[in-house]
Image (spheres, rainbow, N blue to C red):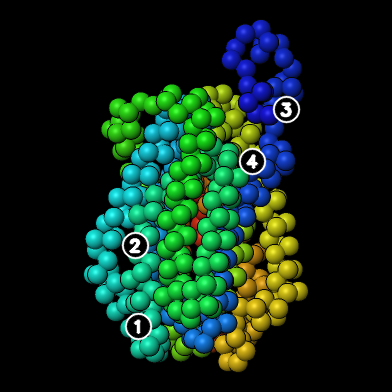
Amino acid sequence: MTWRTQRFKGGLLGVFMPFAARKPVVSYQEILRLAWPASVAASVTPLLGAVDVWALAQSSRPLDIAAVGLGSVIFSLAYWTFGFIRMSVAGLTAQAAGAEDEPEARAALIRGAAIGAGIGILLLLLQWPIGALSFHLLGAGSEASAETLAHSRIYFDIRIWGAPFALASYAAFGWFSARGRTDYLMAVSIFMTALNIGLDYWFVVGLNMGAAGVAWGTLVAEVSGFFISIALIVLLLADNGGLKAHWRVSEFWNADRIARTISINVDIFIRTLLLAFCFAWFVQRGGAFGDVTLAANQALLQLFLFTGLALDGTAIAAETLVGRALGARDKIMAQDRYHQAVRKTFILSSLAAIAFGVFYWLTGDALIALLTPSGPIRLATQIHMPWVIISPLIVVVGFQLDGIFIGATRSREMRDSMIISTMIFIPASLWLAGQWGNQGLWAAFSLYFLLRAATLGVWLPRIGRLFTA
């Protein structure tokens, strides 16, 4: 029996129905229904980076792997920084859905898409100073060659034109997951990945365009994904009252709702900015050890990101379930559903993390051979592969807690957790890298994810208390 059919709006049936029959249950089947499409959707995002690495490894310009690695840092910093768009839309929409407030669920989408498109246009207008500053910082203290930096700039100049489309799509992605349609999220992600793979092969392997070919492939995929998202939004609106129903235009810009949205977005903006900065710092510090280490770290980072984002499926399921529980009117029943969602999503995510660790242990050499050209880059990648093998157990708790806090729209705790973790990570990375080189850098990076989990875990009980407030 589903959650919707278990809800009662008063009357004798609700009074006399036994408690056990009325008790809302979060089943593993429900979690998996939400989680597996979200896992597929999330995991194909770093797969794009892995395909880029593979295509360049097959070309006559394998060191362009380092160039794309540096250029990608800028977009990771920009796009992850504005990842608050997806997160805030997901949390606010899930709570609106739990309260059965369809007009507000639609308004959350419009606000998020407007913010995303607006920021993307601003990035386009400021692309020259952003590029100049970014490459100045990336080149500072780095042993990356002038040729690598030049090709990175070409990559940036092409891909930046996809920013409005990519950031507006973030709102759609959050909205799909909050509405329980992670299958739509998966469909868009698979389409973009398949298109990008085909374009990578054509531009990079076939036409030998190097970093520029990777950039063009990504740009076309991002623009196409935006229009596919619009088509799926139309289908979802048609299934929820029709295209013309539930629109309260005056509520789009309701002052109280906007104030809450801004407050959440500012906190998550700071949190995500620091997250992206730490990834950028990791890549930039890897560049201090030369092009070979930089290219090896880029290959390993794709596997690291694949692990974390594949595990993010249960976190996205937690976003939806926690948000709906907090939005529900019956707080007693919702509280029980919340606790079940937290417990069962943690169990599933932990099992998945163990499975990923075993998978990397068994297939690590084959994956490295697939992603890197033979020679120094492959050797450096093999030396550092153990960090990827243990990465699922390192990132799983933090990712899962992120989903819970996003669903609860507890953005302040997410911000504070990231501030504490970053303040420890930066000096730790300098000291450990100074002592043990790139191995020390990976150790500091792993410590950073453990700190995120620890700080959020301390504040988790605050969400449970919301049901009794």
Q: Nearer the viewer, residue 280 or 253?
A: 253
* Residue beneath the point at 60% across and 26% down: 332
| Left or right of residue 378: residue 21 | right
Residue bearing the label numbered 2: 161
In this view, the residue farthest toward the top is 12
Question: In the image, what residue type sits under mark 2?
Answer: Trp
Q: Mark 4 highlights which residue?
A: 341
Q: Is residue 422 above or below residue 466?
A: below
Q: Is residue 284 visible?
A: no
Image marks 2 and 3: residues in contact by CB distance under 8 Å: no
Tell me whether the residue at label 1 lies in contact with that at label 2, contact meaning CB atoms closer than 8 angstroms.
Answer: no
Identify which amino acid the numbered label 4 is placed on. Ala
Asked whether the residues under the numbered discs 4 and 2 touch, taking CB atoms below 8 Å apart as contact, a structural biologist would say: no
Pick whichever of labels 1 and 4 is earlier in the sequence: 1
Q: Which residue is mark 1?
A: 150
- Quarter occupied by residue 197: bottom right
Front residue (pair 85, 95): 85
